[in-house]
Image (cartoon, grey):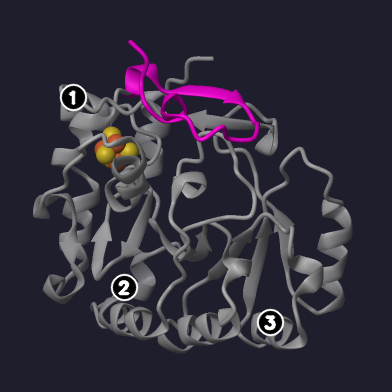
């Protein structure tokens, strides 16, 4: 089913404070078809603690940043795959003491998490956000489990406007020819500027700009980003620069055929290009 974001929604989303996503793992233990963070086709990669400390320290040093952002999301991929997740959590809280922090997970590994994970979640006041996919997982029981450890938990809502939770998924329409009008693509985009991405020493306006690399590696699409698609963390001295980045189209928007963006039934990926690439 075709998806078209109403202009009023697009404007409202851009007026909200931005969320900041961090990939704790690029890969996942569930292969959602068309995952908009490209996890099924991503090489296994875990967040490097040294690089994360460097990047988050630079990010936290931006004057007024804690008031500027809505939330920090520790996600992926599947963050519970990271063996040093308690350290990631504590580092996030130490460097951003005032910001709301949420850990987003599919919950598949939650029952296996040890005491150090639950203690870090509780002591650092991290909210758990479970994505209730239509799979054989007892999500209400997982919410109770989190509650038993004193951790605030909820299930993620629907991002597509269908009211069907995670039973449906966005289906991106990447145009590898790069012939889309960036302004039109940006104006019809449900992602850009809303949830920004902290990755590889830079701040990116969306997950396509930040995490498209698996598309190139697996399907040889040749998507190319340029410095104007993002900001180097060391170059950001004011939230005005972030405001500018999130409120304008950027060169990579030419790859998004958002007039062909769709909402599709959730399913397991077959790792085929058509899950992400626009048809003719
Ligand atoms: S590249 Fe532009 S159009 Fe594509 S998802 Fe990002 S902000 Fe949206």
Quarter containing the C terminus: top left
Q: Please, what secondary structure does the residue beneath circle 3 have? A: helix
Tell me which label, 1 or 2, sits earlier in the chain: 2
Tell me whether the residue at label 3 lies in contact with that at label 1, contact meaning CB atoms closer than 8 angstroms. Answer: no
Q: Earlier in the sequence, mark 3 or mark 2?
A: 2
Q: Is residue 37 visible in the rendered structure shown here?
A: no
**Residue appearing at x 25%, y 81% in the figure:** 58
**Going 11% across and 72% down the picture, which residue do you hit?**
235
Q: Residue 65 has which mark? A: 2
Please give the label number shown on residue 117. 3
Estimate the x, y position of residue 24 in percent, counting from the top left. Answer: 49, 68
Cβ atoms under marks 3 and 2 closer than 8 Å: no
| Beta carbon of the mark 1 residue lies under 8 A of ligand 1 | no
Question: For disc 3, does the CB lie below 8 Å from ligand 1?
Answer: no
In front of the other: 6 or 153 = 153
Q: At x 30% / y 23%, what residue is drawn?
A: 257
Expressed as whole percent of the image width and height from the top left, the position of residue 166 reads: 66, 38
Q: Secondary structure at mark 2?
A: helix
Earlier residue among tags 3 and 1: 3
Q: Which residue is mark 1?
A: 177
Q: Is residue 47 visible?
A: yes
Q: Is residue 277 magenta?
A: yes
Q: Is residue 41 above or below residue 271?
A: below
Which of labels 3 and 1 is toward the front?
Answer: 1
Circle 3 Cα neighbour tier, 10 Å, few/some/many (<14 / 14–19 / ≥20)? some
Which one is in front, 67 or 4? 4
Q: CA distance from mark 3 to mark 1?
A: 44 Å
Q: Is residue 273 left or right of residue 115?
A: left
> Relative to 98, is 149 on the left or the right?
right
Q: Position of residue 67 (x, y in %)?
A: 37, 71
For the record, the magenta segment spans: 258-280
């Amino acid at each position: 089913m075709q998806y078209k974001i109403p202009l009023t929604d697009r404007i409202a989303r851009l007026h909200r404070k931005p969320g900041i996503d961090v990939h704790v793992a690029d890969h996942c233990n569930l292969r959602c078809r068309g995952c908009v963070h490209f996890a099924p086709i991503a090489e296994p990669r875990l967040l490097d603690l040294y690089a994360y400390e460097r990047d988050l320290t630079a990010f936290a040093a931006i004057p007024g940043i804690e008031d500027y952002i809505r939330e920090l999301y520790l996600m992926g991929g599947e963050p519970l795959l990271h063996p040093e997740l308690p350290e990631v959590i504590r580092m996030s809280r130490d460097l951003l003491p005032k910001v709301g922090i949420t850990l987003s997970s599919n919950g598949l590994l939650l029952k296996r998490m040890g005491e150090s994970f639950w203690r870090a979640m509780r002591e650092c006041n991290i909210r758990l956000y479970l994505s209730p996919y239509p799979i054989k997982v007892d999500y209400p029981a997982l919410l109770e489990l989190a509650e038993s450890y004193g951790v605030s938990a909820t299930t993620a809502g629907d991002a597509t406007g269908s009211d069907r939770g995670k039973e449906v998924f966005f289906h991106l329409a990447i145009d590898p020819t790069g012939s889309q009008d960036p302004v039109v693509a940006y104006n019809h985009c449900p992602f850009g500027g809303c949830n920004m991405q902290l990755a590889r020493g830079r701040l990116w306006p969306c997950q396509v700009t930040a995490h498209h690399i698996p598309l190139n590696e697996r399907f040889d699409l040749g998507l190319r980003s340029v410095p104007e698609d993002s900001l180097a963390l060391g170059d950001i001295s004011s939230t005005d620069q972030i405001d500018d980045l999130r409120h304008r189209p950027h060169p990579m928007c030419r790859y998004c055929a958002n007039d062909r963006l769709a909402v599709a039934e959730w399913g397991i990926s077959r790792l085929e290009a058509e899950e992400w690439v626009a048809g003719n």
